[in-house]
Image: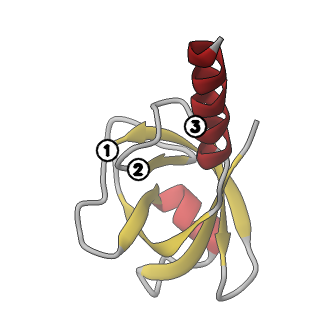
Amino acid sequence: MKQFVLAALGAALTFSGALADEFGVATYYHNPNHGGLIAAHLTLPFGTRARVYNLDNGRNVVVTIGDRGPYATGRIIDVSTVAADALGMRQAGIARVRLELTQ
């Protein structure tokens, strides 16, 4: 019984942590092998869909994680050039963002 309770608690903590919003800085990159609304994240599983909110202008877009990165300190996500255009951040090159996992 004790193992079941601990396993259930661990699963609940993992689930709730996975759905928590993440705040930070986004940059963009060009992936010549895959266009569209894609992004790179250090830990989210490939295929995960996340809504990215640009906190500076209110725009948002849903991207699919298909790569790893960013590796620069303080950056939480690299979005494709298509997503950067949708977010209105391509000219600036960076944006303050909030990530929200979609289900």
Q: What distance separates the C-alpha of mark 3 from that of mark 1? A: 21 Å
Residue wearing tag 3: 14
The disc label shown at residue 31, or none? none
The disc label shown at residue 41, or none? 2
Residue wearing tag 1: 68
Q: What distance separates the C-alpha of mark 1 from that of mark 2? A: 5 Å
x and y, in percent, of residue 28 in the image: 40, 65
Residue 20 picture quarter: bottom right
First in residue order: circle 3 vs circle 1:
3
Quadrant assignment for the C terminus: top right
x and y, in percent, of residue 84 in the image: 53, 67
Q: Secondary structure at mark 2?
A: loop
Residue found at x 63% / y 71%: 87
Disc 3 to disc 2: CB gap under 8 Å: no
x and y, in percent, of residue 10 in the image: 57, 31
Comparing 44 with 79, the one in front is: 44
Above or below for 27 versus 14? below
First in residue order: circle 3 vs circle 2:
3
Q: Secondary structure at mark 1?
A: loop
Question: Which three-letter amino acid code belongs to the residue tagged 3?
Answer: Thr
Question: Which three-letter amino acid code belongs to the residue tagged 1?
Answer: Arg
